[in-house]
Image (spheres, rainbow, N blue to C red):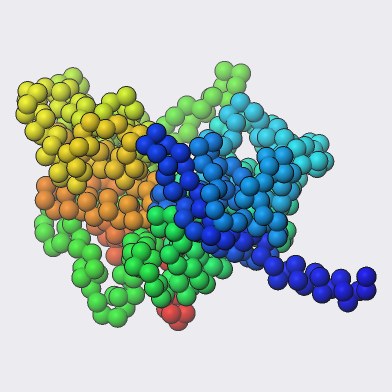
Amino acid sequence: MTTATVKIEETAIQDRPILEIKDLAITFTTGAGEFKAVKNAHLSIMPGETVAIVGESGSGKSTTALAAIGLLPGNGRVTGGQILLDGEDIAHASERRMIELRGSHIGMVPQDPMSNLNPVWKIGYQVRETLKANGRPDGPDDVARVLAEAGLPDAHRRARQYPHEFSGGMRQRALIAIGLSCAPKLLIADEPTSALDVTVQRRILDHLEKMTTELGTSVLLITHDLGLAAERADKVVVMYQGNVVEAGPSLELLRNPQHPYTKRLVESAPSLASRRIQSAKEQGVEAADLLVPAAAGRARDEVLQVRNLRKVYKLRQGMGQSTDFAAVDDVSFSVKRGTTTAIVGESGSGKSTVAKMVLRLESPTEGQIIFDGVDTAGLKGKELFTFRRRVQPIFQDPYGSLDPMYNIYRTIEEPLRIHKIGDAASREKKVRELLDQVALPQGTMQRYPNELSGGQRQRVAIARALALDPEVIICDEAVSALDVLVQAQVLNLLTELQSELGLTYLFITHDLAVVRQIADHVCVMEKGKLVETGTTDDVFDAPQQDYTRALLNAIPGASLLLPPAVA
């Protein structure tokens, strides 16, 4: 074979997609019959290219990715089409063949590191298992090298630690290390940063991009964040109800969406919405014309005052020694009645600890929390019971905050029963009214949490929080686990309820794009301290601290709708 012939063949391979999906159909067998999760899906990924699949939960994006790596659940099967990996159709490949391909040809970074890392195995052992399974050198130095390449410092020591000893970002880096340890031709990244703060997210994605570029690895990125997809991918594929409804170059698709569903995604993406507000203001359009702030020009009294709040934990260091750690250090702010104040910052900034102290789930080490003129630290017994009726929480994870053994009626009715409000008939009437308020059908009452979508569960959590007619609701990352369209629906619902009921919100979040949509005032926390505070417009348009600017700059896709001169 001549040198010229070899070059022609290499060029032909480079011109061939590393992954090509043609008319893919996937069916699940359920108790209610067969369900077509994917219908005639198609996409292609060239060598070294990043392609993102976007869509809401149930659109078929993760199912398509799982089929590509041969990891469909037992009740799922490919019922049509082809999955061509480097020219080989693997749609119906044997498990033995897929084991040969996984790791060396296809790697995967799954969504939730706490669920996908074995809690009883050390991190190094889990990396070693992957190397060993693929016939790669798996000594301590090899394991440490893989972890170091994924950006984990002091890799030899980290290899001897367990997942619970890692932060969320470090656990995600460990999964990236495992996914790329054997230099696969294709990496499937399924929502790899959805649970991370925006700054950690940017660092993880930057490092993932650097590693895949150095290895020449193609990436199939699964995400519900259209802004992130447009910023990180060469091409975007939009899926809806099992179908590919639109595909194309990322910026072109973002700026000129054609399908109605894609248009809805673009309009609902909070990172893009916040930038549209700024762009409109520069063109002389008031933000109030796009989003009406809750406080719109009305004088309000301060329902909540936090003064010099401090929370110190004792950390054990072994040998009977301990050290003090200030999770919250001298934090002061106030919240006006009927408005929304957001507390933002990275994981570990202390924002959730503040929320727990306001709810009296934690007691402050120092400082005061004044609610309606009364210091809550002194509340006990009946007074504390009454306070908790007036201040209610909505937690982050609707999958974990609802009791799976309670049906929806009992879930919402329980606070009424605990506080001895009404009789059985009046409580049922109240539950029905609450379901109407959060736009859930009456038939939902007899269903269980596992029978509802994430957005429906979060609506149930909101209805439960409203059951006692509270004055203040603490929303702790209440929309961070939701798809962009469901997130927009829940944010709109919270805004409508605030307008109707005069509610006050303390909104804890790491997502500044969401803050721009819902908050009147913003408090920025870093390492336990309050570093910046002000109106939402002031903080977003003229941030004073480098840390705040870093948070704003990390919003994925935030600059993509602006012309270069503005961005």
In this view, the residue in front, 418 or 405, is 405
* Residue drawn at (29%, 65%) of the image: 537
* Residue drawn at (46%, 62%) of the image: 244
From this viewpoint, which residue is outermost toward the right? Answer: 1
> Can residue 181 be seen by looking at this rendering?
no
- Compared to 182, does 540 lie above or below? below
In this view, the residue in front, 500 or 548, is 500
- Compared to 224, does 98 lie above or below? above
* Residue drawn at (8%, 33%) of the image: 429
In this view, the residue in front, 195 or 473, is 195
- Which x, y percent locates residue 470? 15, 38
| Among the 4 quarters of the image, the one containing residue 162 | top right
The quadrant of the picture occupied by the C terminus is bottom left
How many marks are shown on the rendered structure?
0
| Among the 4 quarters of the image, the one containing residue 521 | bottom left
- Which x, y percent locates residue 493? 22, 51
In this view, the residue in front, 520 or 482, is 482
- Which x, y percent locates residue 28? 47, 42
- Which x, y percent locates residue 491? 27, 53
> Can residue 254 be seen by looking at this rendering?
yes
The quadrant of the picture occupied by the N terminus is bottom right
| Among the 4 quarters of the image, the one containing residue 331 | top left
- Compared to 108, does 418 lie above or below? above
**316 left or right of 492 in image:** right
